[in-house]
């Protein structure tokens, strides 16, 4: 659909916009490795931020696994801020840097509802090369140190 | 669209599901009162939680104002947990109680990115009566005590 123009303050993150689909692998000391499909949608409404929603499903049987939703912010052209709501009761606030079409952010706070499992920190590296997005996510959870958790590659579908 | 059945653990919150539209009023000691239009979508994917995304716009000129996105969780049939990502850099984790089709939650943590304005707490009362949803939101921000901030009434449109 036609919409408002991309706000110039968020334009350097414009390479994230669109609908992305692909597959990834999950692993962590406390779980069995798994493979997942993923759909990510990133959009804007003319304000200096990007909204996103994401969902994953098991490649075994298609059952829904995770989903995330939140906002990307960009300050002074290179300082990235990320706010994420997680369905398992976590809220993630992360900050980091944009370099070209690569983003690295680390959580500055992880908060949670009283029934959620403890997650201490999350780090995300995201790289976009043309119509391919790849990301690595590291996590410190359940009292364990920061370690690899997710790795995926997505392809750009629709750009709106 | 046809989708998975509503998970029985979240069914008591099923009255939130659907697309809601309406209007509201905003006010706070630090701002001029304003009127807004609102669209709220609440859905599920078969897991014991509800996802939502919301946006508001000025009734003056239609410009986008706020948006929120996150998840509702329900524990033991009556304990409600809410995780919200805000575009202005805040993450809200709130808990409270479900009574019939009324929900009252208060933030147990408000976290934010380094450039976001301080918000200390948020309280939400939501009531659904048939196809009408009304809510009140109170906020403590910018060093001020908890006070009324938003009041709106929405009507149920599509139920999926």
Image: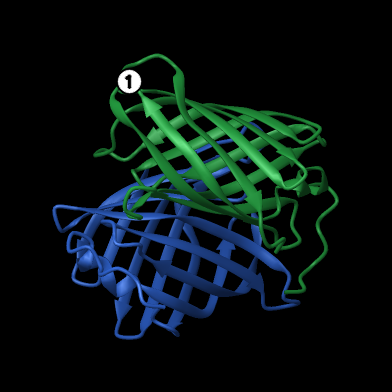
Chain colours: A green, B blue
Q: Residue at x 31, y 17 (%)?
A: A143
Q: Residue at x 45, y 77 (%)?
A: B19
Residue highlighted by disc 1? A29
Q: Residue furthest left?
A: B76
Using residue B136 as the reference point, say whether residue B149 is left or right of it: right
Using residue B73 as the reference point, say whether residue A123 is left or right of it: right
- In the displayed structure, would residue B35 be above or below residue A99? below
Location of residue A134 in the rendering, given as x and y in whole percent from the top left corner? 63, 36
- Residue B110 in view of the camera: no
Q: How many numbered badges does the structure rendering display?
A: 1
Location of residue A139 in the rendering, given as x and y in whole percent from the top left corner? 44, 25
Secondary structure type for disc 1 = loop
Location of residue B144 in the rendering, given as x and y in whole percent from the top left corner? 53, 44
Image quadrant for the N terminus of chain A?
bottom right
- In the displayed structure, would residue A134 be above or below residue B153? above
- Residue A151 in view of the camera: yes
Location of residue A28 in the rendering, given as x and y in whole percent from the top left corner? 36, 24
Q: Residue furthest right?
A: A8
Q: Nearer the viewer, residue B96 or A140?
A: A140
Q: Nearer the viewer, residue B43 or A57?
A: A57
Image quadrant for the C terminus of chain A?
bottom right
- Which quadrant of the view contains residue B2? bottom left
- Which quadrant of the view contains residue A80? top right
Q: Nearer the viewer, residue B17 or B116?
A: B17
Q: Residue at x 53, y 57 (%)?
A: B68
- Label 1: how many Cα within 10 Å (few below 14, some 14–19, many 20+): few
Q: Residue at x 24, y 72 (%)?
A: B101
Q: Nearer the viewer, residue A160 or B30?
A: A160
Q: Residue furthest front?
A: A60
């Amino acid at each position: 659909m036609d919409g408002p123009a991309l706000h110039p303050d968020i334009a350097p993150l414009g390479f994230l916009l669109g609908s992305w689909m692909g597959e990834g692998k999950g692993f962590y000391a406390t779980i069995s490795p798994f493979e997942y499909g993923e759909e990510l949608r990133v959009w804007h409404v003319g304000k200096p931020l990007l909204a996103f929603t994401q969902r994953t499903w098991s490649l075994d049987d298609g059952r829904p696994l995770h989903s995330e939703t939140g906002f990307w912010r960009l300050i002074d052209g290179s300082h990235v801020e990320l706010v994420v709501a997680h369905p398992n009761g976590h809220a993630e606030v992360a900050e980091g840097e944009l370099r070209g079409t690569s983003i690295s952010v680390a959580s500055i706070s992880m908060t949670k509802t009283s029934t959620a499992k403890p997650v201490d920190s999350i780090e995300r590296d995201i790289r976009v090369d043309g119509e391919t997005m790849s990301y690595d996510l590291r996590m410190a959870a359940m009292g364990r140190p920061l370690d690899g958790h997710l790795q995926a590659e997505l392809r750009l579908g629709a750009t709106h």
